Amino acid sequence: MATFLYKLGRIAFRRRHFAVLIWVALLTLAGVGAASAPAAGATSFSIPGTEAQKAFDLLEQRFPGDSADGATGRIVFKAPEGQKMTDADNKATVEKAVKELGDGSEVVSVTDPFTTNAVSKDGTVAYTSVKYDAPGMALEDSTKDALETAGDDARATGLTVDVGGDALEAAAEMGAIGEVIGLAIAAVVLVITLGSLVAAGLPLLTAIIGVGIGVSTITALANALDLGDTTSTLAMMIGLAVGIDYALFIVSRYRGELAEGREPEEAAGRATGTAGSAVVFAGLTVVIALAGLAVVNVPMLTKMGLAAAGTVVVAVLIALTMIPAMLGYAGRKIRPAGEKRRGAKKDKARDTATTTTTSGKPAKPNMGTRWASFVIRRPAAVLLLGVVGLGVVAVPATQLELGLPDDGSQPTSTTQRRAYDTLSEGFGPGFNGPLMIVVDAKDSDDPKAAATTVTDGIKDLSGVKTVTPASFNKAGDTATITVIPDSKPSSTQTEDLVHAIRDQGADVKADTDASVLVTGTTAMNIDFSQKLNDALVPYLALVVGLAFLLLIVVFRSILVPLKAALGFLLSVLAALGAVVAVFQWGWLAGLIGVQETGPVMSMMPIFMVGVVFGLAMDYEVFLVTRMREAYVHGESPNQAIVTGFRHSARVVVAAAIIMMAVFGGFIGASDAMIKMIGFGLAIAVFFDAFVVRMAIVPAVLALLGDKAWWLPKWLDRALPNVDVEGEGLRALDDNSSKDADTDADRKLVNA
């Protein structure tokens, strides 16, 4: 592979105009496609194989025209101190709001709180529910404006009025501020690391082009493939992070080749052949991790993973072709400012832990060399400290509770949160998470008796506050029952109640031939969390297993890939522990603006595993590949570790800081889910890059010595030789030396 990529890099360098033109043309084509594509509609959300989804599908079939997937809006009214909502003036205000809302073109129904018993027992709180014929994401702006205007008009009369429900649901704005902050910090880190504005600009430019192609393509296909806004946001986050990283490693290797005295074209080919090989396999691990989300069997997650994986593929291709082409334009300007050019003396000893300056005095080893030497002297202590430290941080993960955010997790400054709190105050915490019970009595001899049996059975369960009478469809074979729990939607008590109702449904089925299904937003969230939790182990097995096999091919070793996988698990568990401590327990929550603690977002563990695993393997491949390269070229195991750190540690640290900056920019978001994603990914990258890869990896390799690179002979013969360490390029050096010797001999004879 190294030889092929070497030739590709040289071709891109020579045909730089053509290579750049192709990528600019692709960016233009994707941009035109995105601009001309029809606007994306409402993104469907389904959880195949769950009871809540089965009940939801049954409702659409048995209650046609009721818009089962339609959004719901709530206007919550609270009377001033000393008044009640049943007072004449307050009642007139509510009735006026109900009348105004009923005129909306997308409105299916509006409830009058005074006829539907939607007034609290003390008379101070009332609410009206508005049912729409489209999901919240698909509602017209005029419809949402009408809902807010009705609330404003009622508020002007002196009532406390807030609006809640999913009708005000908006597209998650995850990327804007976070990506700007990430890019700004990335630019600073790149300039400091590479010491050249030209060198720092190349990774940023190519990463932006790659992300532009990926996101524009997703936008162009969003309507046809039912892709949501979060799909392009994830692709942007991952694509930008890996795009900068991959370009950074190739540019850094190119500078090293120039320092060895090679011509720019040769240096570009060598950089693409060596660092480019690492980029290919690092990219493959990210693609495997993201595409593996299909194992969960949630269409939304599958699409997000595949779209992000496609953006990573684009980033890899750009790194292998556009970066060498751009290096052709930059030439020797890629070097740090003030560095001596090609004509300077090349007497620096770069293959030892210490170097020598042109004046003959020993130069101070770089930080990577000094750190690696320290770890090699005390490998057991460093390993023990790293593992124990991460283990302690991971302890809170044993208390992990999963759930999905609702209005109760919104900041207290939002109207949705105030509406949630007012309803909890007036009607109890469970009122914000009602359960819908669907009784499928099509096969029952007496549907009404079956519905009565279900209602009576639910009333006897603990944790139930209210059970409404059964409401039948026109055919009379299906009924819906609304259950209000005693506890808030995200509590374990509500989850226990859902399971208790489902367990009771088995007895009802045996006695009446009627099926009992539990659905509603709360039940959907519970089923979604359970499905993700059940899929976590198979997903881990698939992703880690495939990556393990891939890394065996890359490193020609059994223990190095095993160490890489175990180190990743440590960093992910520690990151989950930190997320639980902050967002579930509330430790240091105020420091990052967490206003409401609660269950960890259901998608967080599997999402973190997918994203962080791919990025962790990036650092592993880039760092250890350089060690492997030094080892196969004759260095001792310990010296190979030092060589790998001397050449790669600075760049890996820079890449990790850039990644943390990109993800950390989202911690300041007001949305709790976005804040959690930003914090979780940033802290996971920190643990993996600085504790696992920088400390545990060299410590383990130092303890293993030559055994680290052991591979059974039969397996060595069976595996393909991908030549990531560039052994084929070393043969080119030998041939060049022979040619030079031949030319010298020929000149001597002629003389």
Image: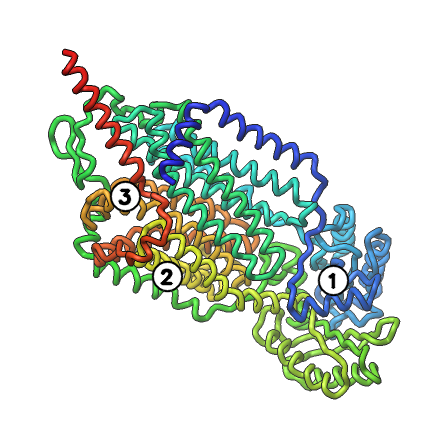
Q: Earlier in the sequence, mark 3 or mark 2?
A: 2
Amino acid carrying mark 3 in the image: Glu
Horizontal relation, residue 690 to residue 612: left or right? left
Q: Are marks 2 and 1 in contact (CB under 8 Å)?
A: no
User: Of helix, strand and loop, which one carries label 1?
Assistant: strand
Q: Quadrant of the C terminus?
A: top left
Residue at numbered disc 2: 570
Which residue is identified by label 1?
A: 77
Identified at 74% across, 51% down, the residue is: 148
Pinpoint residue 483: horizontal percent, then vertical percent.
71, 75
For this orientation, the residue located farthest to the bottom is: 511
Residue at x 82%, y 85% (from the top left corner): 449
User: Of residues 420 and 395, which is closer to you in this image?
Assistant: 395
Tell us which disc is closer to us: 1 or 3: 3
Out of 736 and 633, give the one closest to the viewer.
736
Residue 43 tag number: none
For residue 629, the mark is 3
